[in-house]
Image (spheres, rainbow, N blue to C red):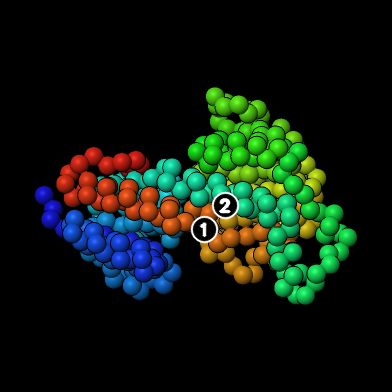
Amino acid sequence: MIDHLKVLFHYAAGQSLRSDVEQLSKQGLDVVCCPEGADTPFEEEIQDAQVLWHVLQPVTADVIRRAPKLKLIQKLGVGVNTIDLEAAKARDIAVCNMPGTNSQAVAEMTLYLMLGALRQGTRLDRACRNGTWYLDAATKDTLGEISGRTVGFVGFGAIPKILAPILQTMGARVIYFAQQSKTVPYEFASLESLLEQSDIVTLHVPATPETNGLISRPRLAKMKPGAILINTARGELVDEEALHEALKSGHLNAAGLDVFAQEPVSPQNPLLALDNVVVTPHVAWLTNETLSRCVDVAVRNSLAIMHGKDLEHRVV
């Protein structure tokens, strides 16, 4: 049985969170916090880490190669597309995720982006900061409400289950597309039909070879004129060049994006220059409450590795 494990928490933890995880040494978990971004501290710390708490920066085959003592890669979230699962499997390194821990936060951020897109939040913020108090007629014509609109969920897992009844209470009609119909009080539609009907299309599917480029140029063209696209899932789902064209031409009224095909997103990404795009830096999942739930699961799985117990939500 192992007495202590070195846990590398690959995240720029604030002082309060850092203090909390440091207390885990009493349970045999020696947690070292290492911010994402610059490689130098991470490269040094990963060499003798036995557990990696992974957030977003990719865990490549090369990272795994440089971690000879690694026994567990614990994803703080759901999507494991940022982990080389085959390399982990080849080394017999367990990989776990934690479905449900960030669903509330992502649902709330999705609603925030919907409202920001409908009310042209980026455009109004810039106008106000630049001293423009009275809106031009073109901007006034673009502002809208959720009530009376059709919201189409692409994918219907934990996040849409939280958000759909809220939207319905606000007066929206809710429809969804998924691999198969669900036992829910909302209309099931094909993807093409959903795109044609929806005033707001919101994405909630994982990044896989099958979903890469799911919202392509032809599918963007199928969307209703003046519709809105929301993405809090993965950037790879959307053809960004085609989305920029659709927004620039006015075919789409707005978009709300928390994720991008390349992250960190380049400041030169043309989507960032558009006033009808509301953006956030892949933080839909990030709240103090989510972090607390994530750390709880990560601690349980790290202790399970230490004591030879079964792991929760094992992927590999």
Secondary element under disc 2, as helix, strand or loop, is helix
Tell which circle, 2 or 1, labels the residue nearer the N-terminal end.
2
Amino acid marked by disc 2: Met
Q: Identify the mark at residue 283; answer none if there is no mark.
A: 1
Residue 5: x percent and y percent? 20, 58
Quadrant location, the C terminus: top left
Residue contact between numbered discs 2 and 1, judged by CB atoms under 8 Å: yes
- For label 2, the crowd category at 10 Å Cα-Cα, with few meaning under 14, some 14 to 19 and many 20 or more, is many
Amino acid marked by disc 1: Val
Secondary element under disc 1, as helix, strand or loop, is loop
**Residue 175 image-quadrant placement:** top right
Q: Tell me if residue 236 can be seen.
A: no
Residue 58 lies left or right of residue 221; in this view the side is left
Residue 121: x percent and y percent? 70, 60
Identify the residue at horizontal 27%, vertical 47% (top origin). 301
Image: 40 above or below 289: below
Residue assigned mark 2: 109
Residue 209: x percent and y percent? 52, 43
**Residue 52 image-quadrant placement:** bottom left
Q: Identify the mark at residue 314; answer none if there is no mark.
A: none
Towards the viewer: 49 or 35: 35
Residue 162 lies left or right of residue 49; in this view the side is right
Q: Tell me if residue 172 can be seen.
A: yes
Towards the viewer: 20 or 38: 20
